Image (cartoon, rainbow, N blue to C red):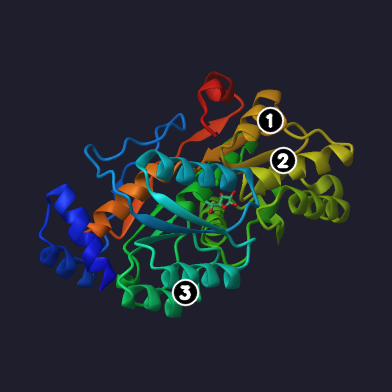
Amino acid sequence: MKSNRLMNQIGARLGLFTATTAAILWAGCGQQSKPVTGGPSASGGAPASTPGATKAGYTVGFAQVGAESSWRTAETDSIKGEAEQRGVTLKFSDAQGKQENQIKAVRGFIAQGVDAIILAPVVETGWEPVLKEAKQAGIPVVLVDRGLKVADESLYATLIASDFVAEGRMAAEWLVKKTGGKASIIELQGTPGAAPAIDRKKGFEEGLKEHVDMKIIASQSGDFRRSVGKEVAEALLKVHGTKVTAVYAHNDDMALGAIQAIEEAGRKPGVDVIVVSIDGVKGAFEAMVKGTLNCSVECSPLLGPLAFDAVEKALAGVELPKKTIVDDQVYDTTTAKDVIDSRKY
Ligand code: GYE
């Protein structure tokens, strides 16, 4: 099996395991779930890589969702940059938001005999067959930024992502405080079926549960895109008019689109309509400094170092926790100006 050969090489380089030990560990990769905290710093800085990580000439296929948001572009840059720094040959695929394209890309990587695959799954379900194919070929799959649902967790090595439910809850808690517990909210959801869309909705609703005057009056998908966020906000503002006092967007790009729509509707974003979103991208910090966006919950896309640390460990047969949770922080108009210059994405 080709992965045995590679694990042999990497294992020898790392001096951690014999090839046999490594092969046994990976083959029995039904590791238990063990959430650990770690990751990008509060100011969006990259996490430190494992000291002494191998500089291997191995090949990784990265099946990316697409380029729907500035967050996504920053994640792509982080993974490409880290591959280059480590001397890893990276095969990159942009699925243009379509799961079928992503599945094809993963199959292509398997056929090309890559050593490992990094996958950012566009939606949560439908991955079993292709992940089984990767496992059969002995190719470890590291999931980044979005989780997926499979009955058999040994089909992937690990997931490195933020806690999206917690992000939604933080956005809700911030909004409750800001509005004194009374608001008529438009929710702009992410891509239907995507882990961050499902969980950010859930967390937000949980955060509003005790507050009867916090009402979501409309909730629709804006597909994590600025242009769609704007269109949807425009339509909803037409229907609900001045009743709308707040917008909650599952990402900054949609919030920035909604801000334009609010302005075009003759209202003041950040004042007449409170806007809260998630990601903490540069454009969001600029809008917070201007006062048009009120709050953004950070979600770091700088996952390259953690992703390749995980790939190298998986290839060396090191047992990985099923999930590594990246820390997130809340920023708003009062704190944004102090940190905007140190933001890395
Ligand atoms: O928040 C959004 C992007 O999966 C965490 O996807 C990611 C999300 C991110 O398009 O901007």
Toward the viewer: 219 or 136?
136
Element carrying mark 3: loop
Residue bearing the label numbered 3: 127
Mark 1 or 3, closer to the camera: 3
In the displayed structure, would residue 42 be above or below residue 133?
above
Q: Amino acid at mark 2?
A: Leu
Residue bearing the label numbered 1: 287
Label 3 Cα crowd, 10 Å radius (few <14 / some 14-19 / many 20+):
some
Element carrying mark 1: helix
Residues marked 1 and 2 touching at CB (< 8 Å): yes
Toward the viewer: 292 or 76?
76
Q: In which image quadrant can residue 153 be found?
A: bottom left
CA gap, disc 2 and disc 3: 32 Å
Residue bearing the label numbered 2: 256
Q: Position of residue 178 (x, y in %)?
A: 61, 35
Q: Amino acid at mark 3?
A: Trp
Label 2 Cα crowd, 10 Å radius (few <14 / some 14-19 / many 20+):
many
**Left or right of residue 9: residue 190:** right
**Residue at x-position 49% and y-position 70%:** 108
**Closer to the N terminus: mark 1 or mark 2?**
2
- Image mark for residue 330: none
Q: Position of residue 280 (x, y in %)?
A: 56, 37
